[in-house]
Amino acid sequence: MLRVVLLGIILLSLMACTPDPVLDLVQLEAQARGGDQAAISQFVDLLGSEATDVADRSYTVLIELGEQAAPALIAKVDAADRQQREYVIAALGTLKVVDAIPAISTVLTDTTLKRRYVAAWALGEIGAVEALPALIRALSDDNSEVRRYATRALIKFHKSSVLPLVDYLAQASGEGAAGAVRALGDIADPRALEVLLIHARGAQRAEAFLALGKLRDSRAESALIAGLTDADERVRMNAAMALGPLGGTLAEKPLRKSLEDDVHVVREWSARSLEMITGQPVLYRNSHDEFVRPYTVYH
Amino acid sequence: MLKKSINLWLLVCIVSIALYGCGSDEKTAVDGSSGTGHLQGQITLPLEGAKLYIYKPGMDLYGPAFAVSPATGIDGRFDLELPDGAYVAVVRKRVSGVENGPVLAGDNRSEFLQVAVHDGVVELDISAPVKIGDQRQFTGDAEVTKTGLAGHVFDSDGQPVEGARVHVYDHVQMSERPKFVSEKTGPDGRFKVYLPAGGTYYLAARDKFGGPPKLGDLYGRYDKGTIEPSAVVVEEGQILKAVDIAVTKVW
């Protein structure tokens, strides 16, 4: 009996001393491509590798595997390792896995987690309306990157996010309102006009003016003209910036008055917009008191 | 579409052989002739690892190309299929091995060549000598002015990013070559760009140079999620501070 126990101890010791087998990524990749779920799961685990090239290669393999990688990826959306979680969510977004929306939305709203920006990005890539509530909530997130990616994701939804954003904006304030205004501006749907005009009189008026310029709706012209005399120079600049693309002739006279604004960039953008409206060269006074034409910021 | 190709024979200038006079100060010729002549020329060899960059007329010849060939082999040849049309071609080979970014001293580059492709094979011989001197416009080379931008580049964990550059554009599309490029950020992620004048600028930060960002690159624009980047307004005589840019992996 003692001999058996000793032999067992020796064998266990030898096993403990055996070095870890070298991972053969080529073989593992072949197995994964053959549909071996264990191999696919191993690649999902490798997304957390400290060796960036291994993580990147695993990511590429999983993307190439497509739908068959989805179950293993979804199982790791809530991985504790932030790098692995980031890669997993990015892969699910790239693969547009609709079934992953609930799990990714949970990550997006869990403010204790790092790198949540990728959850907003992925929901935008997937593009299914089930993701809209989480993305709209994320517009007021404390993390600026989350807000930024949520805004971009909602813009990608285009028309399907307009009414949810309009409803949200009707009662939103602060960063959330600013994000919704930006998204609605880029989508440029006329259904957003009314709520944007309301915000053109409030704290987010600088953002609202830019958005109204993108809508190119003449009904916004008087609000934008009023913005040219706002006390805030940023608001005046944005109003001048927005009036050019709008192209309304009513703005010509107020913009010429803004050529005398105290702030250089307000004068410059007024001249730029006047050139767009009139089609004629317009000079403005630069910071060296020289009268020059604005350069074209658009190609 | 018909298949056309440009077969390129890349030649590099290696040595200019100049045979000068024998060095004698003797004046022997009665008729004013020195009695000697010059034999000049170049010995060339094929350039391996170079790429042909194809632009359409009107494109920024220093920006992203319409098409880029694979790198040449040891024989310097390659074959690039293009639609019928007029193009501008240039050969570049960067010592760093990257596909895009400024051509620096020590890199190979050719002159810009007008090429017309029409239904067939166009044979080109191009010389791509080594560039001497360096005309890049990094901040470190630029004049220190009282106007500029300063801030940090940070990652998705909010940590400073080392080795990134901030690219400054004066066009909202940011599709052309950046007007100014910062030096690489240090361990603290800080950058500073001096500008010749105040105005409206658009910013991006990245860890690679030139061309569209690729999978795995760190990249971020200064924006608030909108399609167009946010305008950064710099007043004359002002170093605008706290212009922080987040970079994330490109997926």
Image: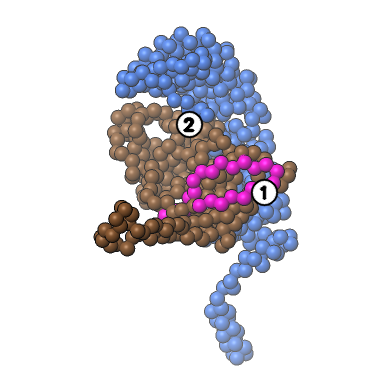
Chain colours: A blue, B brown
Kindly indicate the quadrant of the structure image that contains residue A181.
Answer: top right
Residue positioned 49% across, 56% down in the render: B12
Distance from the alpha carbon under mark 2 to that under mark 1: 38 Å
Dominant secondary structure of the residues highlighted in magenta in the image:
strand
Determine whether, in the image, residue A193 is placed left or right of residue B35: right
Q: Amino acid at mark 1?
A: Val
What is the quadrant of the N terminus of chain A in the image? bottom right
What residue lies at 57% left-to-right and 12% top-to-bottom? A219
Would you name the residue on which mark 1 appears?
A: B121
* Location of mark 2 (residue): B171
For image coordinates 58% across by 79% down, the residue present is A15
Residue B192 shows in the view: no
Q: Which residues are magenta?
A: B106-127
- Inspect the image, locate mark 2, and give the three-letter code of the amino acid beneath it: His
Q: Residue A41: image x %, image y %?
A: 65, 59
The chain letter for the residue carrying disc 1 is B
The one of B78 and A74 positioned closer to us in this rendering = B78
